[in-house]
């Protein structure tokens, strides 16, 4: 009850919750396509790659600027996707290994730059480490407008290109046979992923943004085989996780938003994995029991031990 009173009486927290729900919704939507394309690690690589972009933006500007950080993170994310593609096209290294290389390289540079900034004596660097795990409560109204704009742009793009994204995700070869620009469509999906990662860094943080991108989509996959329902469920799961993380971060001092958001998303995943009607663990256990009973009724004999 105290939480509801706090939310009702504080317009700023209502705006932040709304922004984080939009972020979770858009993360679930674009994350569904990444999961179906078996590119779950790409979100992790892009999120970690954003850290050096944020640090370089701070070193160039000398002050904390959300717009500057987002531009720096966006440039670093695009460079990371180019690096991943270059490695896979010019070597025998597979994509998952290339993503691991790019992730560790960019994050290592980011930590080095962050350490240098923290020892530089610049008073403006205070709070920069919040980008590691996120702090939604520190967001300003202009941050929220930017986040909401990016989220709505992403949802609109996924809605308009749903048919194209669906075919590319399920049957890349067939889409190419139809003459569709498969490479460009995949690049658009990657670019949208960069946008949502960049938008979510301040709320959820560099380290855990990939979890918000992937976990709701994986949880939604347990409940349905139909893509549009999976995307809808992933968006709802992401929105609930974002709202829970924001409320917890705002109510408890020094509690980062990212870990709580990821814990809620993981809890939703655990419930889905256990209780989903067809793919859940209990459903499969029940089906195995029914199959065994039916087999015995038809005169089958158990296997010899």
Image (cartoon, rainbow, N blue to C red):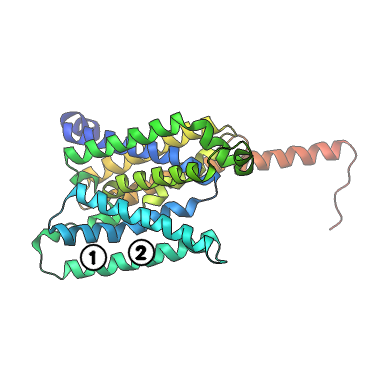
Q: Is residue 305 above or below residue 38?
A: below
Quarter that holds the C terminus: bottom right
Q: In this orientation, does residue 72 appear?
A: yes
Front in this rendered view, residue 175 or 73: 175
Tell me the number on the disc at residue 106: 2
Q: Residue pushed farthest right?
A: 299
Q: In this orientation, does residue 45 appear?
A: no
Front in this rendered view, residue 299 or 122: 122
Report how many numbered discs are placed on residues in the image.
2
The x and y percentages for residue 99 are 47, 60
Which comes sooner in the sequence, label 2 or label 1? 2
Disc 1 packing (10 Å; few <14; some 14–19; many ≥20): many
User: Is residue 56 left or right of 268 when viewed as pictured?
Assistant: left
Q: Identify the element where label 1 is drawn.
A: helix
Quarter that holds the N terminus: top left
The x and y percentages for residue 147 are 27, 39
Which residue appears at 20% of the width and 51% of the height? 68
The x and y percentages for residue 136 are 24, 45
Disc 2 packing (10 Å; few <14; some 14–19; many ≥20): many
The x and y percentages for residue 213 are 42, 46
Q: Which residue is mark 1?
A: 114
Q: Identify the element where label 2 is drawn.
A: helix
Which residue appears at 63% of the width and 36% of the height? 278
Which residue appears at 22% of the width and 35% of the height? 145
Task: Give the mark toward the camera: 2 or 1.
Answer: 2
Task: Kindly indicate the quadrant of the structure image that contains residue 108.
Answer: bottom left
Q: Is residue 149 above or below residue 260?
A: above
Front in this rendered view, residue 55 or 240: 55
Which residue appears at 56% of the width and 40% of the height? 168
Tell me the number on the disc at residue 157: none
């Amino acid at each position: 009850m105290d939480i509801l009173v706090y939310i009702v009486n504080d317009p700023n927290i209502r705006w932040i919750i709304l922004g984080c729900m939009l972020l979770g919704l858009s993360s679930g939507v674009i994350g569904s396509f990444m999961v179906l394309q078996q590119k779950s690690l790409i979100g992790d690589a892009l999120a970690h790659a954003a850290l050096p972009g944020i640090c370089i933006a701070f070193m160039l500007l000398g002050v904390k600027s959300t717009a500057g950080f987002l531009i720096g993170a966006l440039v670093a994310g695009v460079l990371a996707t180019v690096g991943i593609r270059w490695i896979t096209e010019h070597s025998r290294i597979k994509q998952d290994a290339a993503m691991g290389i790019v992730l560790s390289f960019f994050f290592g540079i980011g930590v080095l730059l962050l350490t240098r900034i923290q020892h530089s004596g610049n008073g403006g660097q205070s709070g920069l480490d919040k980008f590691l795990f996120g702090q939604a409560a520190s967001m300003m109204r202009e941050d929220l407008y930017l986040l909401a704009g990016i989220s709505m742009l992403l949802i609109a793009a996924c809605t308009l290109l749903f048919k194209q994204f669906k075919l590319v995700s399920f049957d890349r070869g067939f889409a190419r046979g139809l003459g569709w620009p498969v490479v460009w469509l995949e690049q658009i999906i990657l670019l949208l992923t960069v946008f949502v990662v960049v938008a979510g860094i301040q709320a959820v943080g560099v380290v855990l943004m990939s979890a918000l991108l992937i976990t709701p989509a994986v949880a939604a996959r347990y409940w349905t085989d139909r893509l549009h329902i999976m995307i809808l469920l992933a968006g709802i799961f992401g929105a609930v996780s974002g709202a829970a993380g924001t409320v917890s971060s705002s109510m408890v001092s020094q509690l980062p938003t990212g870990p709580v958001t990821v814990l809620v998303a993981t809890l939703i995943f655990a419930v889905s994995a256990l209780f989903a009607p067809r793919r859940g663990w209990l459903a499969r256990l029940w089906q195995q029991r029914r199959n065994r009973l039916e087999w015995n009724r038809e005169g089958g004999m158990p296997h010899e031990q």
